[in-house]
Image (cartoon, helix red, strand yellow):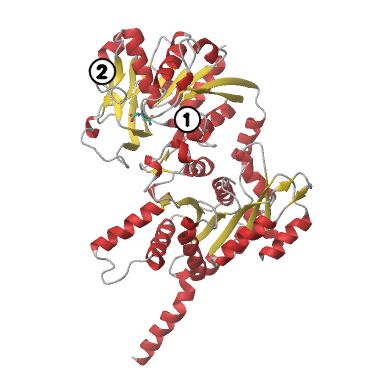
């Protein structure tokens, strides 16, 4: 009895310091950022994860976003760029797109956590009575919830390493609870946790000097929160000499090989190779107490880079959208075009076309010389008429056309108005009084009033007919693609469209919802209700984008 008590007391006390056994062998790497935003934490996290994956580790990446929105689904793209949609239907930060494109592994709901989500689950628990009698506070309740969401990915037994990118910049009030959670995890799990801090070393042109002070201050800000970074990655425009690295190591309390430089490179896909040269993977594995396993297998990756950097031709594609001032609003589309270009060994040049300024009068001048036109996804009325003009131009001039989600709906409206002759045809999203609602709200959407997370989201099946461009691209009749929409093709008009020359060549087998339209008379005119751009990766460029670029290349 007395022994049992001593035993329990011993574990109650020392167990806190030796938590790692209870958590299994999963290791946790945190990527934080300092000095300024937009240094590329997402790309650094993806590149490091890529190298560790190439050494044979199973890995996933998670993003913690400090804003209070439950997810970015309700955000205007001008705020944070594109909203990325996962296979399981989560509306997430665009960094998850990088994670998937680099790792070639799908992410899920659990890979993006926001302050909104954390508070929502804590408040739900409080209402259920889970904390009965207790005052619910940021510490420990919010930080515990953050830790739970971080460890959840590791607890599945699927991953050797979980990389967690912390959004925002160290020192921001809103990221404090996340940094505190990292401090606690480091204290609880010791060597199983590693913090990689990304900062900037600015170059002062006037004095010709690289400055390390902002990095020192940012590490100090982390230290004030009790977190000593293990590895520092320094963004720089100029090579960092040994004396600068030594200075950073000394003042920031890290080993010299833990000071890693990250120079600007022509393409983000070269960042893993640059990190490899800096031995970031080796340093990280050594610090985590993990073996190097094998030399990184980057054969396919290097082949991609080689093709990307040595194109044999060039095509110019018009990207028509209403957020074109902010290229991040179309991140996945741009990257898919890059992947497809590399596959076709050609450089894809994008002509950004603001749909609000396109008119009948300037159409010729705006679209002249384009080898392909892509009409982008979107919501609401702004810029619609310009998109319709762009689509008409592509259809009439036999320019390869690719319409994605709203882009497909636009193709339907344009065809109804200008080919079938239904001049007042529209989507009820733009005009709910239209006499010809060729695009209409989905039945399942009619009773929905809340905006957050209520669209038709994530992966749904599509069955396609064999005699189509889309079949030629996929080489199979059945696949799953991701969605994010409320409106759909109105099947009441299907006969009119098919008679006039626009065919529905892809359907959802369960609901008969039209997923793909084509104009067989046109060399390559494809509109898809789904979002192929979310599933294009470096190692698996999306077949539809590859086919679109191929069609553009043959359109001379
Ligand atoms: N606004 C359209 C809809 O909700 C298209 C959405 C999109 O392009 N993602 O159906």
Residue 255 seen from this side: no
The residue positioned 34% from the left and 17% from the top of the image is: 413
Mark earlier in primary sequence (2, 1): 1
Residue position for label 2:
434
Image side of residue 422 versus residue 314, left or right: left
Ligand 1 within 8 Å of the CB at mark 2: no
Viewer-proximal residue among 173 and 242:
173
The reply to whether residue 116 is in sight is yes
Determine the residue located farthest toward the left in the rendered image. Answer: 447
- Marks 2/1: CA distance? 26 Å
Give the side of residue 109 with respect to residue 309, left or right: left
Q: Which residue is mark 1?
A: 323
Rate crowding at label 1 as few (under 14), some (14 to 19) or many (20 or more) other CA atoms within 10 Å.
many
Tell me where residue 259 appears, x and y as whole percent.
68, 57
User: Ligand 1 shows up in which quadrant of the image?
Assistant: top left
Q: In the rendered structure, find residue 175 and report the number of the disc placed on it.
A: none
């Amino acid at each position: 009895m007395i022994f049992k008590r001593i035993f329990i007391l011993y574990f109650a006390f020392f167990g806190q310091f030796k938590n790692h056994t209870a958590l299994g062998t999963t290791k946790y790497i945190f990527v934080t950022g300092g000095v300024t935003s937009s240094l590329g934490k997402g790309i650094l996290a993806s590149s490091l994860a890529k190298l560790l994956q190439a050494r044979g580790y199973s890995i996933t990446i998670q993003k913690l976003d400090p804003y209070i929105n439950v997810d970015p689904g309700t955000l205007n793209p001008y705020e944070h760029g594109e909203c990325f949609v996962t296979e399981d239907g989560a509306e997430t930060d665009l960094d998850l797109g990088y994670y998937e494109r680099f790792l070639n592994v799908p992410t899920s709901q659990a890979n993006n956590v926001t302050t909104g989500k954390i508070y929502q689950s804590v408040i739900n628990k409080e209402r259920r009575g889970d904390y009965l009698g207790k005052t619910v506070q940021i510490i420990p309740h919010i930080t515990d919830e953050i830790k739970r969401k971080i460890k959840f990915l590791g607890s599945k037994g699927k991953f050797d390493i979980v990389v967690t990118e912390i959004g925002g910049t160290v020192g921001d009030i809103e990221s404090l609870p996340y940094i505190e959670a990292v401090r606690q995890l480091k204290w609880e799990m010791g060597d199983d946790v590693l913090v990689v801090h990304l900062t900037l070393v600015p170059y002062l042109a006037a004095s010709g000097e690289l400055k390390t002070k902002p990095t020192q201050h940012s590490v100090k800000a982390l230290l004030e929160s009790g977190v000593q970074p293990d590895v520092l990655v320094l963004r720089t425009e100029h090579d960092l000499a040994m004396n600068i690295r030594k200075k950073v190591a000394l003042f920031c309390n890290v080993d010299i090989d833990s000071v890693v430089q990250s120079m600007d490179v022509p393409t983000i896909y070269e960042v893993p190779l640059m990190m490899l040269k800096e031995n970031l993977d080796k340093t990280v594995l050594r610090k985590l107490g993990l073996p190097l396993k094998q030399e990184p297998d980057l054969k396919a990756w290097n082949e991609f880079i080689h093709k990307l950097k040595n194109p044999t031709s060039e095509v110019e594609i018009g990207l028509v959208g209403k957020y074109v001032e902010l290229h991040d609003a179309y991140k996945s589309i741009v990257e898919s075009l890059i992947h497809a270009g590399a596959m076709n060994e050609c450089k894809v040049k994008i002509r950004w076309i603001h749909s609000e300024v396109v008119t009948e009068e300037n159409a010729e001048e705006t679209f002249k010389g384009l080898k392909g036109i892509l009409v982008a996804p979107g919501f609401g009325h702004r810029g619609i008429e310009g998109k319709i003009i762009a689509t008409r131009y592509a259809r009439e001039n036999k320019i390869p056309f690719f319409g994605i989600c709203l882009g497909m709906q636009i193709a339907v409206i344009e065809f109804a108005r200008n080919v079938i002759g239904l001049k007042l045809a529209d989507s009820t999203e733009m005009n709910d009084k239209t006499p010809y609602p060729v695009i209409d709200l989905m039945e399942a959407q009619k009773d929905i009033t809340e905006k957050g997370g209520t669209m038709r989201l994530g992966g749904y099946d599509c069955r396609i007919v064999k005699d189509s461009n889309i079949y030629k691209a996929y080489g199979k009749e059945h696949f799953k693609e991701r969605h994010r929409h409320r409106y759909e093709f109105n099947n009441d008009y299907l006969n009119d469209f098919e008679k006039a020359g626009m065919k529905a060549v892809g359907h959802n087998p369960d609901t008969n919802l039209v997923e793909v339209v084509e104009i067989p008379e046109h060399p390559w005119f494809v509109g898809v209700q789904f979002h192929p751009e979310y599933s294009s990766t470096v190692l698996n460029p999306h077949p539809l984008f590859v086919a679109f670029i191929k069609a553009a290349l043959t359109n001379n």
